[in-house]
Image (cartoon, grey):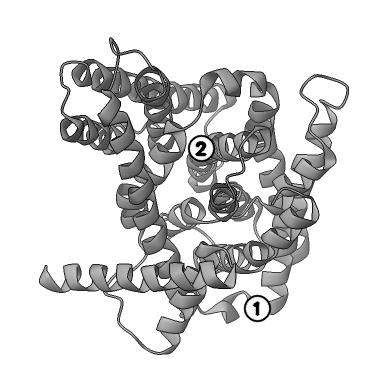
Amino acid sequence: MDLVVAHTIALLGVALLVAIAARRLRLPYTVGLAIAGVALAIAKVETGETLTHDFIFDIILPPLLFEAALSIHWRELKRDLAPVLVLSTLGVVVSAAVVAVGMTRLLGWPFGSALVFGALIAATDPVAVIAMFKDARVKGRLRLVVETESLFNDGVAAVMFALVLTWAQATTAGAPTAAETARALAVMTGGGLAVGLLCGAGGIAIAGRSFDHLVETGLTVVVAYGSFLIAERFRFSGVLATVAAGMLMGNRGLLREDPRWGFSPHGRTFIVAFWDFAAFVANSLIFLLIGSAVADIPFSTVGATGLAAAIALVLAGRLLTVYPLCLLFLWSRWAIPLGEQHVLWWGGLRGALALALALALPPDLPLRDEILVAAFGVVAFSVIAQGLTMPLLLRRLGFL
């Protein structure tokens, strides 16, 4: 136990040094963390932590999802809810389909395994882009669309992954019917949202009886992790549960300036600062460990051609998601300018959730190791290559 604590403190120390260096060099913080993780692995430095599905799902994801959901204003989101929902639902399906068909045609993967890979890699994680927006104090519609589309996208991708994996593992005779799939989809989605809303409402009700900012902050921690774990325990969507709980607590308790509801004024300020720090710690650990793990991944299992094909297909899937779907709103009040579409496409980075889903794959799934290696390859390219070039794109488009 002492060794685990020591390694965790050491990783945080490295993260702080990287944060200082990245700010001075004007590099995205998450990219610096991933590069530092690779350097630690090459130097044979023992980090003491390894990337596992449980570590990412049970420890890392809840604070990242909850912190992002807390700051989303429902009144602002309503104005752009239509394009956000289309991009995060139909967009996930399109992206997964493009990747699956491409991996089958180009690399000869079985369609079931290719579709599993397409579903898990459809989950976006634009944390580097959001971090740059925060540093530059960029607010407004673009930041809202990027952040909310990613949150909803993650929930949809996680649900679709579970359904696709069940289908891929089933025999022809035991494959679920369309009705069974629709019922499972409704249960996972509806159950996750219901758990999140119930936990969030309970947290607000209890917070209204206390004016202690520490108690109020503790309640948000219980709700963030509790909603996720309860939903997963009943095989609902933990991602959607935490997002729903965060949005409810944010809009009805944190962002609502009404002393009769939610948190005390001091509590609101303290909670925002606490979750900023919690997200910083979670991002620091996950991106350092991603970099460290990438250095040890046997990429030769897939080969350079296979990795290049996977990366190109993921970018193509995102491209065929963003531009055609945004075209649907071209002559409406929801029209998204072309520059913002460029940010949505190139800023659709892959990260923690995609790796968590890949690490959860059962050992008997055909091409399980190849899917895992391809997922790490795409995430590494996404975090480093896309992350490094995003500041250039944002400056060129006039957003920074």
Going 19% across and 19% down the picture, which residue do you hit? 206
The residue located at (81%, 25%) in the rendering is 329
Label 1: element kind:
helix
Q: In the rendered image, which quarter is residue 212 located in?
A: top left
Residue closer to the observer: 4 or 165 = 4
**Which quadrant of the rendered structure holds the N terminus?**
bottom left
Residue 13 in which image quadrant: bottom left
Q: In the figure, residue 14 lies in which quadrant?
A: bottom left
- Which residue does the numbered mark 2 point to in the structure image? 163
Crowding around mark 2 (Cα neighbors within 10 Å: few <14, some 14 to 19, many 20+) is some
Is residue 361 shown to the viewer in this render?
no
Task: Label 2, secondary structure: give it.
Answer: helix
> Looking at the rendered structure, which numbered label has been put on residue 303?
1
Q: Earlier in the sequence, mark 1 or mark 2?
A: 2
Residue at the outermost top position: 260
**Most foreground residue, 90 or 72:** 72
Q: Which amino acid type corresponds to the residue marked 1 in the rendered image?
A: Gly
Query: Which mark, by number, is residue 354?
Result: none
Q: Report whether 211 appears left or right of 176.
A: left
For marks 1 and 2, give the CA distance. 29 Å
Q: Residues within 10 Å of mark 1 (few under 14, many from 20)?
A: some
Q: Nearer the viewer, residue 306 or 136?
A: 136
